[in-house]
Image (spheres, rainbow, N blue to C red):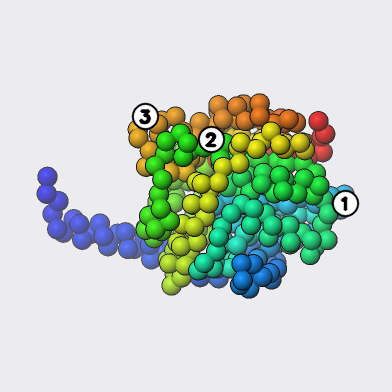
């Protein structure tokens, strides 16, 4: 069936109008306001000077403890807004960095991204802030990073909380086709607010949508609408390769500190799933089964399940999530 040229033109104009209505941000999220003051940790890494943005939010009434929040691939320190408020109100100092390559931090043209490197950067930040021990929380990709941090720095990690971490299965070993960095880059260049919104609704929020979720869509999409989109897409491609090729699940048995899994079971996240054969695609990202399976690998673990929530339970249902988080942080096992 042929589609009239007029219809195609009108559809294109409509798409442009929607895009024009979306805010435009710089490659380091210039123009997007964070809920707390942003500070910058300057470091030399891989023969270059870099800046690591971070939030350091004091407790309302300090209990002497610190929580470090590690964001996911499509997230930033800002997306921890609700969690920071809940934690600081409960007495915790909160440190939430933007990792190198993400959000308000430097996006280098050349960088050997690894979870070990990002963990080392985070440890350097904590050393400068004189934080000797902390509870480490990781969400999504941040769960992989938090696990690697705990493996490298067990003395610093009082306990570990993994919120819908990705990497609970080895996609490459299961048969998901490999994408080159260049292929990831071309894919990321096509990023749009409409595509992000559709993906987030189906994956992050279990099919639900509320107007307040749009802020996080615009945060991510806005970097792809500005002049620095190539820089943003390139760093996104480099970190996608890191995620796909550097599994941590085989080392979960070496995590001897308390580990709490907080799992929204409607999540279906799996890196590269869109390229997988249909038969395999249907089996990937089944968090209802990945949570219990991962629990068996942990020497000292517990599982908190949210059967009706998706990939971002702390954003989707903060009124249910944060009481469980605070109880987990205060209860030893």
- Residue 250: give x, y in percent of width and height: 61, 36
Tell which of 164 and 252 is nearer to you.
252
Instruction: Confirm whether residue 244 shows in the render.
Output: yes
Camera-nearest label, 2 or 1: 2
- Badge 2 density bin: few <14, some 14–19, many ≥20, Cα 10 Å: some
- Badge 3 density bin: few <14, some 14–19, many ≥20, Cα 10 Å: few
State yes or no: discs 3 and 1 in contact (Cβ < 8 Å): no
- Residue 74: give x, y in percent of width and height: 53, 53
Residue highlighted by disc 3: 279
Q: Disc 3 to disc 1, how far (Cα)? A: 50 Å
Residue 304, quarter of the rendered image: top right
Tell which of 325 and 294 is nearer to you.
294
Residue 314, quarter of the rendered image: top right
Precedes in sequence: disc 3 or disc 2: 2
- Residue 305: give x, y in percent of width and height: 63, 30
Residue highlighted by disc 2: 169
Instruction: Confirm whether residue 314 shows in the render.
Output: no
Tell which of 16 and 270 is nearer to you.
270
Residue highlighted by disc 1: 64
Q: Disc 2 to disc 1, how far (Cα)? A: 36 Å
Precedes in sequence: disc 3 or disc 1: 1
- Residue 61: give x, y in percent of width and height: 86, 53
Residue 45's disc number: none
Above or below, 178 against 58 in this view is above
Q: Name the residue located 79 percent from the left edge and 61 percent from the top edge.
A: 127
Count of number-bearing discs: 3
Tell which of 307 and 110 is nearer to you.
110
Q: Disc 3 to disc 2, how far (Cα)? A: 16 Å
Q: Name the residue located 64 percent from the left edge and 57 percent from the top edge.
A: 117
Q: Is label 3 in a helix, a strand or a loop?
A: helix
Q: Is label 2 in a helix, a strand or a loop?
A: loop
Precedes in sequence: disc 2 or disc 1: 1
């Amino acid at each position: 069936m042929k589609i009239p040229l007029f219809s195609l033109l009108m559809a294109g104009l409509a798409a442009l109008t929607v895009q024009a209505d979306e805010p435009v941000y710089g490659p380091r999220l210039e123009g997007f306001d964070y809920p707390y003051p942003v500070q910058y940790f300057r470091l030399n890494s891989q023969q270059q000077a870099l800046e690591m943005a971070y939030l350091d939010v004091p407790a309302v009434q300090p209990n002497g403890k610190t929580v470090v929040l590690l964001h996911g691939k499509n997230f930033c320190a800002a997306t921890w807004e609700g969690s920071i408020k809940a934690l600081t109100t409960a007495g915790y100092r909160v440190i939430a960095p933007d990792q190198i390559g993400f959000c308000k931090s430097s996006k280098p043209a050349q960088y050997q991204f690894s979870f070990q490197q990002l963990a080392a950067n985070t440890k350097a930040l904590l050393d400068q802030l004189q934080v000797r021990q902390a509870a480490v929380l990781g969400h999504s990709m941040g769960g992989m990073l938090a696990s690697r941090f705990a493996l490298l720095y067990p003395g610093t990690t009082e306990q570990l909380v993994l919120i819908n971490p990705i990497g609970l299965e080895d996609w490459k070993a299961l048969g998901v086709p490999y994408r080159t960095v260049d292929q990831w880059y071309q894919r990321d260049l096509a990023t749009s607010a409409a595509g992000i919104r559709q993906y987030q609704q189906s994956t992050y929020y279990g099919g639900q949508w509320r107007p307040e979720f749009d802020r996080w869509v615009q945060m991510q999409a806005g970097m792809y609408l500005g002049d620095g989109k190539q820089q943003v897409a390139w760093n996104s491609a480099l970190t996608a390769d890191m995620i796909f090729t550097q599994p941590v699940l085989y080392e979960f048995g070496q995590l001897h500190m308390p580990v709490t899994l907080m799992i929204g079971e409607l999540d279906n996240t799996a890196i590269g799933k869109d390229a997988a054969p249909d038969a395999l695609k249907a089996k990937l990202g089944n968090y209802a089964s990945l949570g219990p399976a991962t629990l068996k690998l942990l020497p000292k673990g517990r599982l908190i399940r949210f059967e009706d929530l998706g990939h971002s339970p702390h954003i989707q249902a903060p009124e249910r999530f944060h009481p469980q988080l605070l109880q987990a942080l205060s209860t030893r096992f």
